[in-house]
Image: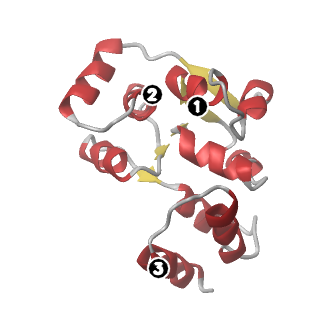
């Protein structure tokens, strides 16, 4: 299974010490260089910066067609470089799944025919696979510790889906 990730799922899981869920669920995660740089080549400490440099199961890959990234950003306002590269890399690799939280990026990725899930979908899958007992405490921790934004409607839907 080929899984490409944007920045948010990695940094948010790292912020609540649950990054290993990605390895347990997907074995390997591929990130584009822009996502790597968003986590490592910044002046502030970003959760997961050390991990993505140390963990062999997180692979950084260069985009083959840089013009495709420019095209994605040109065709869609407010798509940052990391999101655009993640979408293009997922297309280039014919990825089975793209991990992305930002709504505009998710909509665009789906329009390109990609299968997309976000961090909350990862938590639901982890619970379904018996890797975590409950979604609610992790969602609450994401909101409190990582400043993860979840509408009250989505919060309730996720808990209902999780059977909590």
Q: Check the image and report above or below for 68 versus 18.
A: above
Distance from disc 2 to disc 3, alpha carbons, whole Å, reads: 32 Å
Of callouts 1 and 2, the N-terminal one = 1
**Relative image position of residue 158 (x, y in whole percent):** 52, 75
Q: Are marks 2 and 3 in contact (CB under 8 Å)?
A: no
Structural distance between the alpha carbons of marks 1 and 2: 10 Å
Question: At x 79% / y 53%, what residue is drawn?
Answer: 17
Quarter of the figure with the N terminus: top right
Mark identifier at residue 30? 1
Circle number at residue 93: 2
**Is residue 85 placed above or below 147 in the rendered structure?**
above
> Which of pointers 2 and 3 lies earlier in the amino acid sequence?
2
Tell me whether circle 1 and circle 2 mark residues in contact (CB < 8 Å): yes
> Which mark identifies residue 111?
none
Res 1 visible: no
SS type, badge 1:
strand
Q: On the image, numbered disc 3 is attached to which residue?
A: 157
* Residue at horizontal 72 percent and vertical 38 percent from the top: 48
Above or below residue 106? Residue 76 is above
Q: Residues within 10 Å of mark 1 (few under 14, many from 20)?
A: many
């Amino acid at each position: 299974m080929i899984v490409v990730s944007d920045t948010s799922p990695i940094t948010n899981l790292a912020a609540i010490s649950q990054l290993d869920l990605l390895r347990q669920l997907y074995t390997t995660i591929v990130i584009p260089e822009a996502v790597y740089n968003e986590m490592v080549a910044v002046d502030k400490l970003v959760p997961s910066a050390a991990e993505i440099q140390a963990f062999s199961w997180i692979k950084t890959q260069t985009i083959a067609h840089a013009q495709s990234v420019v095209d994605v950003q040109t065709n869609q306002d407010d798509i940052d470089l990391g999101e655009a590269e993640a979408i293009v890399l997922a297309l280039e690799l014919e990825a089975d799944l793209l991990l992305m939280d930002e709504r505009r990026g998710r909509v665009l990725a789906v329009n390109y025919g990609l299968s997309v899930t976000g961090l909350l979908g990862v938590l639901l899958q982890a619970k379904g696979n018996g890797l975590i007992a409950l979604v609610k405490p992790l969602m609450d921790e994401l909101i409190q510790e990582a400043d993860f934004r979840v509408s009250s409607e989505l919060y309730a839907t996720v808990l209902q889906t999780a059977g909590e």
